[in-house]
């Protein structure tokens, strides 16, 4: 079936094509597959990560610290690379904490957030001397008790559930009833109790939402975040040393989506700096980002193992699937399934010649990696590349579903 070219996913950038083949880190994907030794696999380009951090720093005002949220991609090699580029790491489990500490970064530049920290996790975090983002008054009391047993004074911040949300965000992390943080109106009482405990107050973590592609919505959330931090600081036992304003910067996945204008984001935040300085003093403002920094740097590579036609519709069956790349299948937050950017890697500069569905190897109709894609004719043995796979890929997927092997990950 021949089809006209049509936009079925977001534009692709950052991966040159040489001799008709997609490349990553200067290596042809076909050659990289031989080096890895098996498919499927994830490949991450360190150069793209470095470039994204540099471009963001150039756009942001001075005085903004960048933290990498490890949950986006906790591969140890990726975390080590990012630790050399950013000012801090944010973890969401004791396991991630150990990976962060292994990078050699100063523990004071590691923060730990999560709504269900166990006593064992808290004890390890206190012993590691990292900043703990407290999610509730109850967690605060547990931290104080554990710290008393250890005979130390831990550094703590309060994670605040703001009384607003990040409009048009892909995932709302604040506003309304939430399992994350303490409701803003209850924080003053928590601060009063904190002053009675042997805890080192470090600041606030205020995160309203993620995956946003509207500059004006990000500015509004940042403005409200800084204003909220100023109000809460008045009830604190001492001036905050740090305010984590979250991130929320999105990346384009689907048709019609465009990358953020970083200069506009930076200009908006720069206009808020005088207000922050006046209300908070010499505070460190932190932007916590994960997906934005590493998402566009990753590819998921899978191989076509069968080509079949069912009632006139072409299906390219691969050895990968949703058990490795759940988000690309549409089963990780999408209401209506949309296509991630996808190419036949060895025919990357070919025009669309047929309409085909790319499906995985699992025995479920949910295992779809591309619907009605305009692609060069895919054959058994060809490699398929799924873009925007550097964040929430392998670690966010049900890798044990149906017992297939776990794919390898490489940083190039």
Image (cartoon, grey):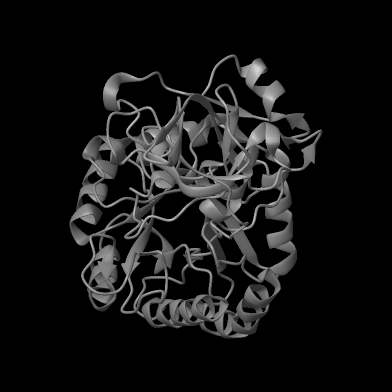
Residue 207 appears in the figure: no
Q: Quadrant of residue 368?
A: top left
**Which quadrant holds the C terminus?**
top right
Name the residue nearer the viewer: 301 or 365.
365
Picture layout, residue 230 above or below residue 386: below
Q: Percent x, y for residue 210?
A: 44, 63
Image side of residue 104 versus residue 203, left or right: right
Q: Is residue 76 above or below residue 328?
A: above
In the displayed structure, 50 sits above or below 28; it is: below
Answer with the quarter of the image where residue 76 lies: top right
Task: Indicate left or right for 372 with 30 as reference.
Answer: left
Out of 367 and 400, give the one closest to the viewer. 367
The residue under the point 64% across, 84% down is 271
Between 387 and 87, the one lying in front of the other is 387
Left or right, 98 with respect to 22, comes to left
Q: Residue at x 67, y 46 (%)?
A: 49
Q: Is residue 179 visible?
A: yes
Residue lying furthest right in this view? 19
Q: Position of residue 407 (x, y in %)?
A: 47, 23
Classify residue 298 as left or right of residue 141: right
Comparing 372 with 61, the one in front is: 372
x and y percent of residue 371 in the render? Answer: 44, 48
* Total residue callouts: 0
Q: Residue at position x 68%, y 79% from top?
A: 267
Q: x and y percent of residue 74 in the render?
A: 48, 37
* Residue under the point 22% across and 53% down: 139
Q: In the orientation shown, which residue stands out farthest toward the top?
A: 37
């Amino acid at each position: 079936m021949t089809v006209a070219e049509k936009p079925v996913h977001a534009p692709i950038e950052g991966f040159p094509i040489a001799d008709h083949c997609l490349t990553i880190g200067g290596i042809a994907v076909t050659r990289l597959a031989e080096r890895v030794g098996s498919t499927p696999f994830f490949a991450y380009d360190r150069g793209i990560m470095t470039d994204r951090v540099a471009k963001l720093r150039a756009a942001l005002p001075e005085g903004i610290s960048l933290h990498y949220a490890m949950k986006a991609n906790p591969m140890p090699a990726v975390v080590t690379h990012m630790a050399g580029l950013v000012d801090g790491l944010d973890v969401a489990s004791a396991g991630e904490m150990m990976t962060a500490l292994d990078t050699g970064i100063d523990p004071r530049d590691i923060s730990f957030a999560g709504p269900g920290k166990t006593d064992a996790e808290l004890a390890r975090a206190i012993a590691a001397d990292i900043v703990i983002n407290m999610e509730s008054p109850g967690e605060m009391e547990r931290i104080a008790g554990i710290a008393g047993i250890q005979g130390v004074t831990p550094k703590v911040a309060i994670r605040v559930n703001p009384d607003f949300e990040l409009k048009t965000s892909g995932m709302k992390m604040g506003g309304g009833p939430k399992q994350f943080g303490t409701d803003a109106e209850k924080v003053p009482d928590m601060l009063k109790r904190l002053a009675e405990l042997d805890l080192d107050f470090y600041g606030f973590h205020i995160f309203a939402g993620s995956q946003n592609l509207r500059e004006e919505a990000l500015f509004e959330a940042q403005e409200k975040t800084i204003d909220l931090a100023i109000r809460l600081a008045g009830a604190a036992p001492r001036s905050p040393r740090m305010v984590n304003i979250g991130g929320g910067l999105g990346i384009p996945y689907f048709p019609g989506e465009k990358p953020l204008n970083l200069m506009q984001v930076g200009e908006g935040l720069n206009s808020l700096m005088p207000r922050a300085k006046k209300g908070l003093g010499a505070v460190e403002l932190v932007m916590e980002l994960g997906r934005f920094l590493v998402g566009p740097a990753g590819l998921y590579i899978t191989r076509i193992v069968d080509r079949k036609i069912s009632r006139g519709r072409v299906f390219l069956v691969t050895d990968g699937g949703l058990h490795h790349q759940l988000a690309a299948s549409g089963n990780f937050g999408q209401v209506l399934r949309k296509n991630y950017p996808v190419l036949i890697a060895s025919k990357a500069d070919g025009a669309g010649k047929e309409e085909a569905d790319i499906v995985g190897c699992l025995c479920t109709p949910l295992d779809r990696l591309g619907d009605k894609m305009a692609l060069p004719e895919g054959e058994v043995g060809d490699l398929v590349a799924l873009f925007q796979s550097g964040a929430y890929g392998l670690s966010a997927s049900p890798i044990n579903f149906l017992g297939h092997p776990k794919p390898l990950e490489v940083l190039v």
